[in-house]
Image (cartoon, rainbow, N blue to C red):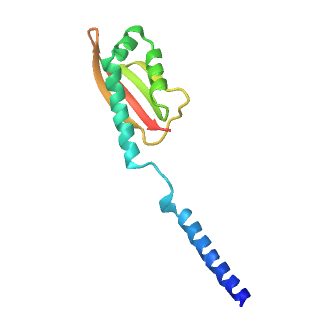
Amino acid sequence: MKGFVLTIDGIIALIVFISLFVIISSPTLRTTSSAWSDVQVRRLSMDSLTILEKNGALGRAVESNSSSELIYFMGSEFTSLCMQITVSEGDSHVLSAVKSGCVEGRGAFITRRSFVSGDDFYTAELHAWSR
């Protein structure tokens, strides 16, 4: 009788183990980029260009022809977000900056913002993606 009870316990344990293994390895439970994180990346990219324009960083970058302030902003603000900023005047490329340590990723959001510096009209384009 003792052997029979141990066999039933073993069978039940095996069924529970296999069930848990199937549930854990199910492809529907694997994490992917969610819609919530996409909304956050989009919002942060739009906010970043707004901040850079309002505090004058875009104008200073164009006037000094240096992207160091833009690179500092990208590196200090968002650790899990990669960015690339390109500033152009009409059809001509003025300057660009890429956050260090970032490789072009999938699902990049593109945000554009226009601004005036001096007497010239510029367009800033920000590509943002999560690491």
Q: Is residue 90 visible?
A: no
On screen, residue 61 above or below 49:
above
Question: Which residue occupies the foreground of this view, 105 or 19?
Answer: 19
> Which residue shows up at 37% across the image and 40% down it?
40
Residue 31: x, y in percent?
49, 53
For image coordinates 30% across by 19% down, the residue present is 54
Q: Is residue 8 above or below residue 85?
A: below
Left or right: 72 in relation to 49:
right
Picture coordinates of residue 5, whole percent (x, y): 68, 85
Give x and y (percent) for residue 89. 33, 18
Residue 39 point in image, percent of width and height: 35, 42
Q: Is residue 97 left or right of residue 60?
A: right
Residue at the (53%, 34%) spot, across then down: 103
Please identify the quarter of the rendering in which residue 65 is found: top left
Q: What residue is drawn where x is 40% and y is 44%? A: 37
Q: Residue furthest bottom?
A: 1
Q: Quadrant of residue 43?
A: top left
Q: Nearer the viewer, residue 105 or 30?
A: 30
Specify whether residue 49 is in view. Answer: yes
